[in-house]
Each structure stands twice: as structure tokens, then as C-alpha cells.
Image (cartoon, rainbow, N blue to C red):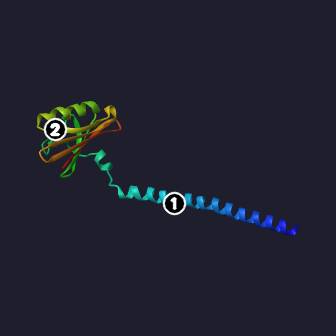
Amino acid sequence: MKRVYKFTLLAILIVTALACGVISNPLSGVQNVASTAEALASAIPSGLPDVSKYLNPQGQPVSDWNGVPIMSQATAGQEFSKNTYSYRVSTVSEPDIQAFYNDKLKALGWTSPFSAQGGSAGGLMFFTKDSQILTITITKVDQDSVVLLNLQ
């Protein structure tokens, strides 16, 4: 009887040890994944460029930027590099901005291979002419719309 008792106790001990190992390994795996996700979450924003400056252009808007028309209703505009310009408008809806660029740029010989218009939420428009690519991003900031032009 003692032998059966010892064997049963040993079997329970082995099963308990295995169960603890099975439980602790997934928990440590979850902890490793969580710490990796936390590290990525803190690293990604620091690696991304700061685009907030494009959403708040300062200065007098121009009427034409590198051959691209700027809406006459623009209230502020700023060139951030030779390839990037943004401006604010407060009295024009996002669909009207999209229609403006569709009409004006097509009249200037630009073609639009792609457009993701989001109505009042803004949109993304692409135009090409010769070897140039123009990307227009339209977004809502406060009560105004911001138009970001990028010419490559």
C-alpha cells in the first residue's frame, strides 16, 4: 500500500509540475509579446515625421505654387520645402475643393489616375503630368480645411 501511495503522490507531483510549466510558458509568452508591443508603440511615433506643421500654415497664401493653382479663398499658406505647400480655407467645403482641383488641373493638362474622395471628411487626390506627380491631401482642422500639396 505504501508503494501505491508513493506512486500516486509522485504522479500528482509530476502532473502538477507539468501543468505549472504549461501555464507559465504561455504567460511568459504573453508578457514577451506585450513588452514587444509596448516597445514598438513608443518607437513608432518617434520615427515618424512631424506633420502637424503642415496643418497650421502661416503667412500670406500665393495664387499659384509651382504651376499649381491655389484657391482664392485661402486664408493662410506656407511653403515647407521646394516640394510641399499647404494652405487653409474656411469658407469652402471639401467636395468643392476636390471639384476645384479636378477642373483646374485637368484644364492645365494634368490627369488623375487615382482619387480617394471622402466627401466632408476630406480626401486624397493624385495627378500626373509629364514626369511630375502631384499629391493633394484635403483634411478638416477645427472649422477650416487644410490643403496639402506635394509635388514630385
Crowdedness near tag 2: few (<14), some (14–19) or many (≥20) residues, C-alpha within 10 Å: some
User: Residues under labels 1 and 2: Cα distance?
Assistant: 47 Å
Q: Amino acid at mark 2?
A: Thr
Residue designated by label 1: 35
Q: Amino acid at mark 1?
A: Ser
- SS for dot 2: strand
Nearer the observer, 66 or 87: 66
* Rendered-image quadrant of the N terminus: bottom right
Is tag 1's residue or tag 2's residue first in the polypeptide sequence? 1
Which residue corresponds to the image point at 32% horizontal and 55% vertical from the top-left? 49
Q: Is residue 28 above or below residue 134?
A: below
Residue 111, labelled with which disc? Answer: 2
- SS for dot 1: helix
Is residue 62 shown left or right of residue 119? Answer: left
Q: Position of residue 64 (x, y in %)?
A: 14, 41
Residue 148, labelled with which disc? Answer: none
